[in-house]
Amino acid sequence: MQPIEIVLIVASVLVVVAVMVSAIVKKAKGKSGCGCGCSGCPHASACQSKKTKKA
């Protein structure tokens, strides 16, 4: 393996890990997966992070 191949593999792994960490942090903060919110979304009923409204 040449050094450039190792650098590309490491960079690819870092990108995948960063995307996964970002998704976990968003979910922990209660944000939707797409980041646009659920109002007006045709798939809002399928959203698993839907919050219940308190009266």
Image (cartoon, grey):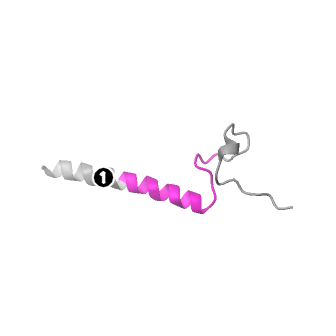
Q: Residue at x 62, y 51 (%)?
A: 32
Decide: is 22 above or below 36: below
Neighbourhood count class around disc 1 (C-alpha, 10 Å): few under 14, some 14–19, many 20 upward: few
| Residue range of the region highlighted in magenta in the rendering | 15-36
Q: Secondary structure at mark 1?
A: helix
Q: Nearest the camera: 11 or 32?
A: 32
Q: Residue at x 61, y 62 (%)?
A: 29
Three-letter amino acid code at the position of disc 1: Ala
Q: Is 50 in the magenta? A: no
Q: Is 30 in the magenta? A: yes
Q: Position of residue 16 (x, y in %)?
A: 38, 52
Q: Position of residue 20 (x, y in %)?
A: 45, 55
Q: Residue at x 61, y 48 (%)?
A: 35
Reading the image, the residue beneath label 1 is: 11
Q: Nearest the camera: 39 or 3?
A: 39
Q: Quadrant of the C terminus?
A: bottom right
Q: In the rendered view, does 9 fall on the left or right side of 38?
A: left
Q: Position of residue 37 (x, y in %)?
A: 67, 47
Q: Main secondary structure of the magenta part?
A: helix
Q: Position of residue 9 (x, y in %)?
A: 26, 51
- Which residue occupies the extreme top position in the image? 42
Q: Nearest the camera: 10 or 48?
A: 48
